[in-house]
Amino acid sequence: MDFLISSFAAALRLLGDLSPDVLDAVGTSLAVSAGATVFAALFGIPLGLLVGLTGFPLKRTVVTVLNTLMAVPTVVVGLLVYGFLSRQGPLGVLGLLFSPTAIVIGGILLATPIVANYSLASVRGADHRIVPTALTLGAGRFLAVGSLIGEIRFGILAAVIAGFGRVVSEVGVAMMLGGNIRGYTRTMTTAIALETSKGEFAFGMALGIVLMTVAFLVNLFLGFLQRK
Amino acid sequence: MKILYRLHSVRKCYGVNVVLAIEDLTIAGNRLYTLIGANGAGKSTLLNILAFLSPPTSGEIFYAGHRVDWDRRSTKEYRRKVTLLHQSPYLFGGTVYDNVAFGLKARGIPAEERQAIVENALDTVGLRGFGGRKARDLSGGETQRVAVARALSLKPEVLLLDEPLANIDRETTGVLETVIASLPSQGTTVVMTTHNPEHPGRLNGEAIFLDGGRVIPRSTYPL
């Protein structure tokens, strides 16, 4: 127990001292997660809306695939992207492996199904009177769908935040595609894994506290939106 | 007499279920019609077709002499002449003003003009000064009145009302009956559904009786 308490105290000291290594890992984590989330939102929101608002053959299959992709292990995504970005891979010439961009690409693949599924759930849960009401008031199809999006905007924002939560807390993609390079691709999660394995438990705990704080704030905001 | 709607051999089916089968129905302008029928008689289905929200499975509909083709562009044009007020109307998030101004905005009416129209419509339903209130904070009766004001603000050729007088308080019923009864003289044809056989007489309207999706003569309607 003394070990945990002394490590926790050391972790707080590290945070208080604003250790450059801690700040680097936090900055990299937030930057790659934000980048991946923006792109995941750009792909996932329209995808969720399209699936939710239109009928097409194999729609159920698409929904099942989206659900399955939500649960894909991060290391599998890491492995897949690694195959494309490695020197022998089809995109190896771009030299992106072990860079923040590679982590962002993996993060996009992780977060897009989540954003799409949550957006789809928002459309499905929306009041079925919204579109007919807009249409009968003279709105065109575009404005009617715009009204629907306006009415479910908090659900869509929640989808984006859930996507961010997935990316910021994962370790497999960041480790395999980023390579855990200090000051460059080291994120909070990869730093925790590395420092703990080196016996630097306090350092890992300091980052754990930051990560938990970020997760807490994200969930707090999510709860606030869901109450809206 | 201006004929607005003419329905010929109109059928609406869901799978093998025929929910509406109207051989001939004519609706003239500047009149008030009440659609009377039990639950499942096809009243709401007919209103959705008349509102151009849902095409019939088969049959022809003419509006103001023009055959309705149900293509996207023409239905949008028709919808701008006809407004449907659902039984349980939906108010968008935002203020009462935002809601009443919705259709006016969709039609590109300038802001200053919108303001006057919205205030006038709210005044008509007895909700003067409600413009700034949050729509979601209103009572059931107020919600119904705002929805009526939203429809009236558009001055539609036809106002379709799905049981507008159900589940509302007596004061709101009185206000809405007065407003609805006055519409034909102002150039708006009204088609409203009701369970109450007294409404046609009280609102000075003509009754259309529906049973099992068919228009039937009054004499055969099971009162």
Image: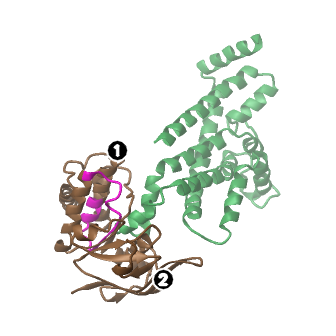
Chain colours: A green, B brown
Q: How far across and down, in percent of the image, does residue A228 sit?
A: 45, 42
Q: Chain of mark 1?
A: B
Instruction: Tell which of A225 and A203 is nearer to you.
Output: A225
Q: Nearer the viewer, mark 2 or mark 1?
A: 2
What chain is tagged by disc 2? B
Which quadrant of the rendered structure holds the N terminus of chain A?
A: top right
Q: Quadrant of residue B162?
A: bottom left
Front one among B93 and B36: B36
User: Which residues make up the magenta segment?
Assistant: B148-170
Cα distance between the residues tagged 2 and 1: 40 Å
Residue B155: say if magenta.
yes
- Residue most toward the top? A2
Q: How many numbered tags mark residues here?
A: 2
Asked if residue A131 can be seen in this view, the reply is: yes
Which residue: 40% across, 70% down? A140
Q: Which residue is mark 1?
A: B137
Find residue A196 and report its horizontal and vertical position in percent: 78, 26
Q: Amino acid at mark 2?
A: Arg
Callout 1 environment at 10 Å: few (<14), some (14 to 19), or many (20+)? few
- Residue tagged 2: B11
Q: Residue at x 34, y 44 (%)?
A: B137
Q: Is disc 2 placed on a helix, strand or loop?
A: strand
Is B180 magenta? The answer is no
Q: Image check: B117 left or right of B141?
A: left
> Picture quarter containing residue A23?
top right
Name which residue lies at 57% across and 61% down: A52
Q: Is residue A182 visible?
A: no
At which x and y percent is residue A168? 65, 39
Residue kind at label 1, given as amino acid type? Asp
